[in-house]
Image (cartoon, rainbow, N blue to C red):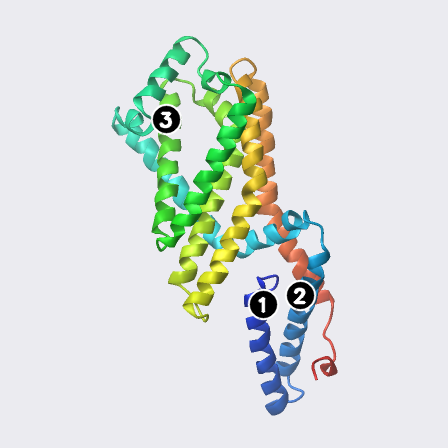
Amino acid sequence: MEQGLHLDADRLAANFVELSDDLAYARTFYPGSDVEKYLNRLVASYLTDINVGRASHTKKWWTFWVTDFPLLLFEKRKTLWFALVFFLLSVLVGVFSAAREDSFVRLILGDGYVNMTLENIAAGTPMKVYDGQDALDMFLRITFNNIKVAFIAFAWGLLFSAGTLKVLFQNGIMVGAFQYFFYQKGLLLHSALSIWAHGTFEMTAIVIAGGAGLVLGNSFLFPGTFPRLQSFRIGALQGIKILVGLLPFFILAGWIESFITRYADARPVVGLIAMVVSVVGVIGYFVVYPGYLARNRNLKTEDAGTPVLSNFE
């Protein structure tokens, strides 16, 4: 309950009702006790959050990405970290499989793509695939495809989270096999500077979308104290909010891939700069900022002090 601030409306209301009942009981049977004072302070923090929620209707639309989305990521951080670890393990499986079986890369990436890339490597332009299309058309196609993959990763959470894990596993295997292929050709660094210029945002968003799918599936599998259908409804709304929050990052990843990655062969330093900026942006927004925001919000609530009991009479 102490860490349950800034939740969705249904869970916030349920917690507030339960705490209010406990406070009424404590005031009846343990008046003036430390328990009563503790519950009074905790109820006050929830009341403050509820009042802030009422005022949120007048907020600007961008406050969703400034406040609501990062706080939701912080609340679901354990599930998101699980999705990331599972994805990284899948990448390692892809690397190991490609190292042990020569045909594995062709099985995963397809003969057409592998043959085309080998031709590009022989011509001295291994990343030519990113420079062979009109930038705008490429941007629209890639962005739409990434959003589609994210939606599939989320929607397959309906299969009791197993479907989402399958999507994360497939994408991890592909990334691992892809990178090992370039490692075999002595182009690991060159490919990394090219691919992860846009792939940092792209893969991060797909992993988080997978985490949203796990939130959806787990809400039905592990409802906690809520009725199963109510828990599922809460999980679905939270997952959808996470997906909506990822949209700008899919657009940004598509823009980088279409308009910047195409210069990877001619100007590797451009890819390096884009990759560094992407890594800093991902760590800053998805890791550091949510924790900072949550701690800052809790500190503000604690600084508000303990209200007098008459506020709840």
Say what secondary structure mark 2 lies in: helix
Marks 2 and 1, Cα distance to the nearest angstrom?
A: 9 Å
**Crowding at label 2, few (<14), some or many (≥20) Cα neighbours within 10 Å?**
some
In this orientation, does residue 118 appear? yes
Foreground: disc 2 or disc 3: 2
Secondary structure beneath disc 3? helix
Q: Circle 3 sits on which residue? A: 180
Residue 273 appears in which quarter of the rendering? Answer: top right
Give SS at disc 1. helix
Q: Are marks 2 and 1 in contact (CB under 8 Å)?
A: yes
C-alpha gap between disc 1 and disc 3: 47 Å
Q: Position of residue 80 (x, y in %)?
A: 48, 50
Residue on which disc 1 sits: 12
Q: Which mark is residue 49?
A: 2
Q: Residue furthest bottom?
A: 29
Q: Which residue: 64% across, 73% down?
A: 42
Mark 2: amino acid:
Asp
Q: Nearer the viewer, mark 1 or mark 3?
A: 1
